[in-house]
Every structure is written in structure tokens, then in C-alpha cells.
Image: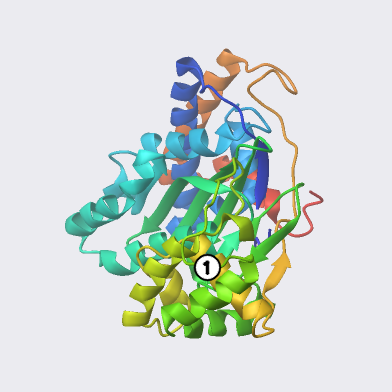
Amino acid sequence: MPFGRSGTAILPLHGGKAPAWLFQRMKALAREVSLAIIAEFGTSGFLERISDPFWFQCLGSTLGFDWHSSGLTTTLTGAIKEGLKGLEEETGLYLAGGKGGRARKTPSEIRAAGEKTGIDPSALIYASRLSARVDNNALQDGFRLYHHSFFFDRQGNWAVIQQGMNETSRLARRYHWLGTEVKDFVVEPHRAICSELRGSVLNLVKEESAGARALLAELAGRAPEKNIRDLNSLLGGEGLFPELLMPRRHRIEGVDIDPSRIHRILIRTYENPPGNFEALIGMEGVGPATIRALSMIAELIYGEKPSFRDPARFSFAVGGKDGIPYPVNRKVYDRTIEIMKRALERARVGQREKLEAVRRLMRYSLPGSGI
């Protein structure tokens, strides 16, 4: 495995967007780099690289974007998607989703690709949905997802890049997944979560949370009144409908849990008991508050402790858009796009040594690279 790293990417939240002159160039260069990678390493090689946070960050900076802005994630995935639009049949690579409302279109975009190619969309849609559920509900680190990009090929290989925001800390966290490395959606499934900011989080996808995962599914299938009684005893409440004032922060804590709302969800889980934790987080209506409530019951009533270790490990610093380490030179940028186009054309007729510059970019994250 060439890019074996584990961790999430933390970036400052920045407003605004890339200027049109820059995005057009990013789109063009992203297309040429992507085509070169696919020509050299196939679609699986592209998915491996895009799911590595260091390589992803390096590519974003190579395209001239701000080295530490949260916008790198949304702008880079958007540039790749726009750059490869119309080339799906040629490349065998498909991109779905995006920021905000575009993320919600992911299932329909996957189905549309399936209709054109014969790809069975069901497993891909499931992977898209579960990866989002895990990062929003099973890994409660205070970051609310607002971006979800799903990359896949004709062979059913896939990668996910999604990002959450914490408006209180003004930071964003990026999550990377690679389908070929996901052995279990709810047991340490991430390709990477890299961050300078680390803290105590509810991490139900940690290996050591196995007992909690099993118990949460069991608790979800027992009588709702019993769960609510236990929950009220933990929260210090007396009835089913205590008053609750919602805080500005996004992290779910005990004081954020309204037993009356949880009760309605628990009726559903009682009537249709989930067979395991993966089925539980996949159930409609089961959100972070329900998962937090069940984990509190599991830990404090039954002694089954989940992990509270933050999986984020890495950060990085490379250069870009805001004049750091130097301003974008438009002439050099345009010349680079042209060189990439010519290199790819020559590679197609056998002059593959012309892609040596691209190969150096490929090796950026390889062990022993010195990075």
C-alpha cells in the first residue's frame, strides 16, 4: 500500500471563493494532471492518490490555491469534477456530490452514471451514505459535514473526500476514505483524518469501541421507556419532556439531549431492531444525539466505555493562492497547463518518459520520500 497514513486534515475556515481567472486555470491543470495519472496508473491509482491527504494538499497547492484554507477542499474537488466533465467514458472515472446542496445530489448522480455504464449503483450509494453517517454521527468531534465528494470507477472502486466545519473554533476538518481499504464501515475505516487540533471526542469507530458498538445496537432494540428512564437518570431529569436550550456549539454533549425527541427515534429502533451498529447508524432519523444518548447509557449504566480518542494526527504546510510562498504567476500557470497537455499527448504515442515531472508528484507521499 503506497499511501498508508491514518489521520483528518484541519484547515482554517475562510470565506469567499477562488477568482474566476484562477479557477479556470485550476480546472484545466487538474484535468491534465488527472488524465496523466489515469494514463500512468489507472483509475485505481488516481483513487489511491486522491484519498491521501498529503498528496491531495500537494495537488491543491500545485494548482495555486491557498495552502491552508478550508476552501482548498471544495475548490480542488470542484476543479477536478469540472475539468473531467464529459470525459467520463474516456477515463472510466466518475465524480458525484460537492458542497452543500450538491452533496445531496450524490445518490442521483451515481444512479445516472449507472444507467449509462451498467454499474450497479446500490453498493456505491451505500458507501456514500455510510461514510457520511460515520463522520457525522459515529465520530462526534464537533465538526458538522457540509461537503461530500464521491469518486468512483467502472470496477466499483471508490474514494470519499468530505469536510465538516466547527463555527465556534472557525476550523474545518477533512476526512478521506478509500474503498479498497475499508474492511468494515464502523471499525477504523478512514484513509486519513489529519489535524493539529485534537481533543476528546466520541469515537465509536475506534477498535477499542467494539463492545460499545455491540451494546448500542442491543440498546436500540429494547423498550424505549426503559432507555428514556435510564437517560433521564443520567441527565438529572424527572419527566419525558424537560426544557432544553440549544447551544451555539456543534459538539453533542449530555446537556444537548432532549429525551422527548430521542423517545420518538427509539420507538422506531424498537419496532425495527438493528442487527448491528452499522445498521443502527444507517437507520433514517438516527442522528448524533441518539447515538450519544445510547453511548451514555452503555457507558454509565452498563460500564461499556467507547473510545474518546481523537483520530486526527497530521497537518501540513505547502504554498499557494494568497501570495504564500509567492503570488500565482499566470504566464507560468498557462505554460504548465500546455506542457501537461503535450506530455500527455506524447505519452499516448509511447513517449512516457515525458511524464517524469508527474511521476515526481506521484512520489510525494511515498515512504522514504523525505516528506
Q: Nearer the viewer, residue 235 or 14?
A: 235
* Residue type of the residue flagged with mark 1: Ile
Q: Position of residue 8 (x, y in %)?
A: 65, 53
The residue pinned by badge 1 equals: 291
The total of numbered circles placed on residues is: 1
The front one of 5 and 353 is 5
Q: Position of residue 120 (x, y in %)?
A: 25, 67
Q: Residue at x 24, y 54 (%)?
A: 113
Residue farthest right in this picture: 370
The answer, for residue 246, to whether it is visible in the render is yes
Q: Residue shown at 38%/76% (left/top)?
A: 269
Is 7 left or right of 180, judged from the image as shown?
right
Return the x and y of residue 2 as percentages of the image width and height: 64, 63
Instruction: Specify the farthest residue to the left.
Output: 115
| Quadrant that contains the N terminus | bottom right
Viewer-side residue, 283 vs 226: 226
In-image side of 337 versus 359 (left or right): left
Q: Decide which of 137, 15 is in the foreground and name it.
A: 137
Residue positioned most to the front: 238
Residue for point 71% across, 29% down: 319
Secondary structure beneath label 1: helix
Q: Residue at x 52, y 53 (%)?
A: 243
